[in-house]
Image (cartoon, helix red, strand yellow):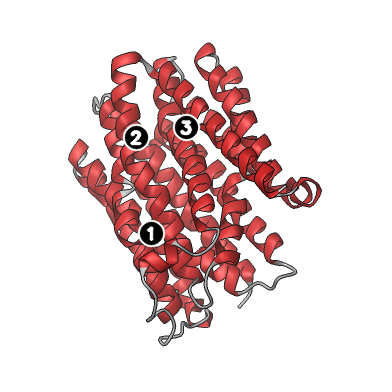
Amino acid sequence: MSVNFVVALALFNMASVRAGRVLLTLYAIKLGAQPATIGMLAAAFAVVPILFSQASGRWSDRFGSRWLLLFGVAGSSSGMLLPYFHPSITAIFVAGVLSGVSMTFCNVSLQNLVGVLSHAENRVKNFGNYTLAGSSAAFLGPLIAGFAIDHTGYDWTCLIVIAIAMVPMTMLVSHGSLLPRGNPEVSKEGSLWQALTTPGVWPVLITSCMGQTVGDFFQFYMPVYAHDAGLSASAIGVVLAAYSAATFVARIFLPGLIQRWGEQRVLINAFTVAAVALILVPVFQSGVLLAAVSFLIGLGMGCVAPITLMMMFTRSAAGRSGEALGLRLAADNLTRLFAPMLFGAIASAAGLAVVFWLNALMLGSGGLFARHRSARKG
C-alpha cells in the first residue's frame, strides 16, 4: 500500500471536516449564538477525541485502521444531516460532537499509517506530505463552505459536506483491505502512565498543545471577528484560506529549515512570527489586511504539527506508535475543551481583541519554553 493512498484519504476526509466546522460555526452565528456559545461549540469538537484518542491509537496498533477509518468518516458525515433536517443550536452541537468522531478515529489512524508505511530515510518527507494534505484541506474546506453558503444556503451546504466525505468512504470500501493489518499481540502490555513517562514525551505534548490550541482558536474566532467587521461569508472563507495557504508554504520548506536550523530553533521562530501577527489582528478590519495577517500566522503555525508528529512517532515505544499519536491528540483536545470556553467568556466580557492578545502571549511563552530546552541541550 502506498503512502499516497493514505495522503489522499487524509485530504478528502479533512476537507470535509474543515468545511463542516466553518459551516457549523457560521450557522450557529446565523441562529444567534454569542461568542461564549461559539466557545462551547469549539469545545464540543474536542469531547470525543479526549475520551477515545489514546484507545483509538491502541486499537489501530492491534487491529489495523480500515474499520476505524470507516467508522470515523461515517460518524462525521451523518452528523451533518442533523442541521439539514432540524436547523437549531442543539443540532449543531450534536453535529460538532460527531465531527469529533472523525477527528478521533481518522486522524490517529492516518498519522500512524504514514509512520508505519515509511522508512527512516523518507519519514520526514512523508509526514511533510501528510501535513501538506492537511493544509490543502484546510485551504479548500473554508473556501467550499463559504462560497456554498453564499450561493446555495446553509442546508444545501450540509449536503455538499457529506458529498465530500463520500470520497474517502468509497476509497475505504474499495481498497481499504490493502491497508496494513494490526498485531493483536501488540499493546496488551503497558499503561497510560508508562506512555506518558516515555522519555521526551512531555515536551512534545506541551508544544503540540500550544500550537493546536492557537490554531483552533484562530479557526473559530477569526470568523466571529471578521463577521463583526462586516465581511461576507465568502470573504471570511478567503481569510481562513490564507492561513491554510501559508501552512502549505511553510511545510514545503520545512525539511530544509529543519536541516539548516534544527527542530528547536524552527519552533522558536515559528512561535515568534505567529505571536506578533496575532497581536496585529484587532488592528485591522479590511479583508485584505486580515488575510495578510492570517497568512503570517499560518507561516508560523504550519511548522508545529509536522514537527510534533514526527517527534511523537519516533519517541514512541515499539509497537505503540498509534497509541502515542493518540495520546498527543488527546492532550491537544483536552486543552481545546477548556480553552475555547475560557476564551469565549473573556471575549464576551472584554472583547475579542483581548483574546487574540492572550493567544499571542501563550505563543510567546511557548517560544521561551523551546528556547530554554534548546539552551539546556546546548
Q: Is residue 350 above or below residue 378?
A: above
Residue 33 occupies which quadrant of the picture? top left
Closer to the camera in the image, 338 or 198: 198
Q: Amino acid at mark 2?
A: Pro
Residue 119, percent from left and from top? 69, 73
The residues tagged by marks 3 and 1 sit, at their Cα atoms, a distance apart of: 21 Å
Which comes sooner in the sequence, label 3 or label 1? 1
Q: Amino acid at mark 3?
A: Phe
Closer to the camera in the image, 294 or 286: 294
Q: Is residue 188 above or below residue 120?
A: below
Number of marks: 3
Q: Is residue 54 left or right of residue 289?
A: left
Please say whether residue 64 is visible from this viewpoint: no
Badge 1 marks a residue whose secondary structure is: helix
Q: Is residue 216 left or right of residue 26?
A: right
Which comes sooner in the sequence, label 2 or label 3? 3
Q: Amino acid at mark 1?
A: Thr
Residue 247, percent from left and from top? 62, 41
Q: Residue at x 42, y 30 (%)?
A: 150
Which comes sooner in the sequence, label 2 or label 1? 1
Q: Residue at x 48, y 21 (%)?
A: 357
Q: Which residue is mark 1?
A: 104
Q: Which residue is mark 3?
A: 218
Front of the two marks 2 and 3: 2
Q: Which residue is mark 2?
A: 340
